[in-house]
Image (cartoon, rainbow, N blue to C red):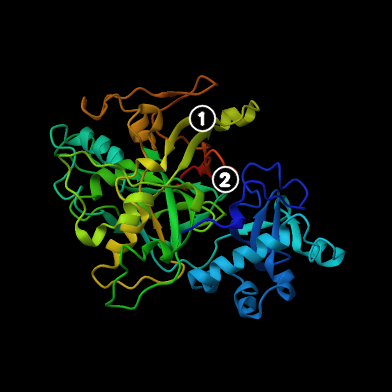
Amino acid sequence: MSMDQTHDVNLSSWVDGANEHADFPIQNLPFCCFVQGGESKIGVGIGDWVLSVAEIVTLLDSKFHAAVTSDNLKTMMGWSPADRLAFRQRISELLSDGNDELQGNDALRNAALLRQTDVQFVLPCSIGDYTDFYASVYHATNVGSMFRPNNPLLPNYKHVPIGYHGRASSIVMSGADVRRPHGQLSPDAEGGNPNFGPCKLLDYELEVGFFVSQGNELGSQISIDDADDHIFGYCLVNDWSARDIQKWEYQPLGPFLAKSFATTISPWIVTTEALAPFRSPAMVRPNDDPQPLPYLSSDANTAGGLIDLNLVVSIQSEQMRADNIGPTELSRGSFLNMYWTPAQMVTHHSVNGCNLAPGDMMASGTVSGQSRGSRGCLLELTWDGEIGNPVPGTQRTPIQLPTGEERRFLADGDRVVMEGFCERSGHRRIGFGRCEGTILPALY
């Protein structure tokens, strides 16, 4: 994606507070869906406000009318890249200083601009399919080192983007509580029998999600050169994980009940077009690593396949809330640490002829870096080993909270907060908002 006038660092908006807001300046314009008065609508973020695009339909080209008056983003997600760009440019124009079309119409402006605190955010669409990848080599190596210290990465990892089919029905909006799941728990000792009960080793996973725009016909493929055009935009994802259930069930077919009880996503979808200033090269692979097969390789992907996205995870226990202590930071990571790019994930997903569709969601897998402070889940963050110096997986140093509490895994009442932002010299900082959820006790 190339840059245009909508990315101009000097561009400002007439919307009150928009030019001071760190997450949603006019250079961002992320999408959301929200409910107001019992009706679901499409919105665009600007400062602390939501622009209800259905209210300004008379200011838009007629070809956009059906999509923007829909109750979800699925039709819009199916637009061509040219239409997505044209719509972004028109919204930017209407919100820019010096444009009076919306600002000068008091009734229309007051109907269209809503405080974010006055609306309820909902899922952007009915998500048809959800695929979760495993694209961070540091995460894969850390986890592999806990259980296979001498062989942390399986032979296929550096040749193929690894993924699994997730559960779309249990994807929930940021702010929704998450119930501690039940399941078969791994035996206490090798060779023993499993137990049944509430998960004891509940974890979060910091991930980046992305939504499919135009799909492909069954039996066809999306080429690596075209893959970015098939990504509508990005959000934050918390792939909640029941580690004791996962340990018992994942062999031989991989994740199942340990993941399907809940996945939380942020309300905002930051578009592929908005992220153009923050494109960055794909990870430079060591000389002794295999290079991607030709169908997973292109000059454009090598030069700009990743996004310079900073990611922060914080936690707030129930006791911290009672003591009026805000969330405390656990880790900081970067999406630049991914071994596989989103375009490679999309291309690989379709290479067998699998048909992707507008509104399908994919996620990156846990985003982790080389340092301990950049690990994207408690399983890694509390682990005392490190890449190149593994120790058995049971040796852990707990996280210390400001209240004196300790955490190796999540406790009931814990609230996990994820945030993301892109920041680069010569461009306005843009944010992804927050992805948060609070753990409720098991039902019985």
Q: Do the residues labelled 2 and 1 touch (CB within 8 Å)?
A: no
Identify the residue position indicated by label 2 in the image. Answer: 431
The image shows residue 190, relative to residue 373, as above or below, that is: below
> In front: 125, or 62?
62
Label 2 sits on what residue type? Answer: Gly
- Left or right of 15, for residue 425: left
Where's residue 55, x and y in %? 74, 70
The mark lying in front, picked from 2 and 1, is: 2
Label 1 sits on what residue type? Answer: Glu
C-alpha separation, residue under disc 2 versus residue under disc 1: 17 Å
- Left or right of 347, for residue 413: right
- What residue lies at 43% left-to-right and 71% top-to-bottom? 214
Residue 185 in sight here: no
Where's residue 156, x and y in %? 16, 50
The image shows residue 412, relative to residue 395, as above or below, that is: below
The image shows residue 395, relative to residue 187, as above or below, that is: above
Per the rendering, the mark at residue 329 is 1
Q: In which quarter of the image is residue 114?
A: bottom right
Where's residue 26, x and y in %? 66, 52
Q: In which quarter of the image is residue 318?
A: top right
